[in-house]
Image (cartoon, rainbow, N blue to C red):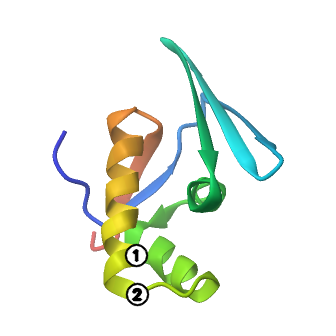
Amino acid sequence: MPTISLDTVFTQRPDLLANAVDGETILMRLDPAVYYGLAGTAHRIWHLLAVPHSGHSLCARLESMYAVDPETCRTQVAKFLNTLADENLLCAVASASA
């Protein structure tokens, strides 16, 4: 899969089962049957993706919550969004520049 642009607006796939337990999100995809555990910042990002966000807006929110260098945040958020996209856990809604 090509590298994700931080301009793209994403949201959670609606057909996933998700439950937050003790600061962690457990995701389950039924076809094929696979589950994932998201903790820490990954849990926070998943929670934010309940409504559409671009990678840039996710970074802005995270930078306001955590003491993180903007470049580090962009790099890590892009990497995480690529992982979620590779696992087919996201829906691309639109390009923020569109």
Quadrant, the C terminus: bottom left
Please tell me which residue is depicted at 55% across the width and 87% down the height of the picture. Answer: 67
Query: To which residue does mark 2 refer?
Result: 69
Rendering coords of residue 64 (x, y %): 59, 88
- Helix, strand or loop under label 2: loop
Quadrant, the N terminus: top left
Are circles 2 and 1 on residues that touch, CB within 8 Å? Answer: yes
**Amino acid of disc 2:** Asp
Query: To which residue does mark 1 refer?
Result: 73
Q: Is residue 97 visible?
A: yes
**Amino acid of disc 1:** Cys
Quarter of the image where one finds residue 79: bottom left
Rendering coords of residue 21 (x, y %): 82, 42
Side of 76 where 44 appears, left or right: right
Mark 2–mark 1 Cα distance, whole angstroms, equals 6 Å
Please tell me which residue is depicted at 42% across the width and 67% down the height of the picture. Answer: 54
Q: Is residue 96 above or below residue 13?
A: below
For disc 2, the neighbor class at 10 Å (few under 14, some 14 to 19, many from 20) is few
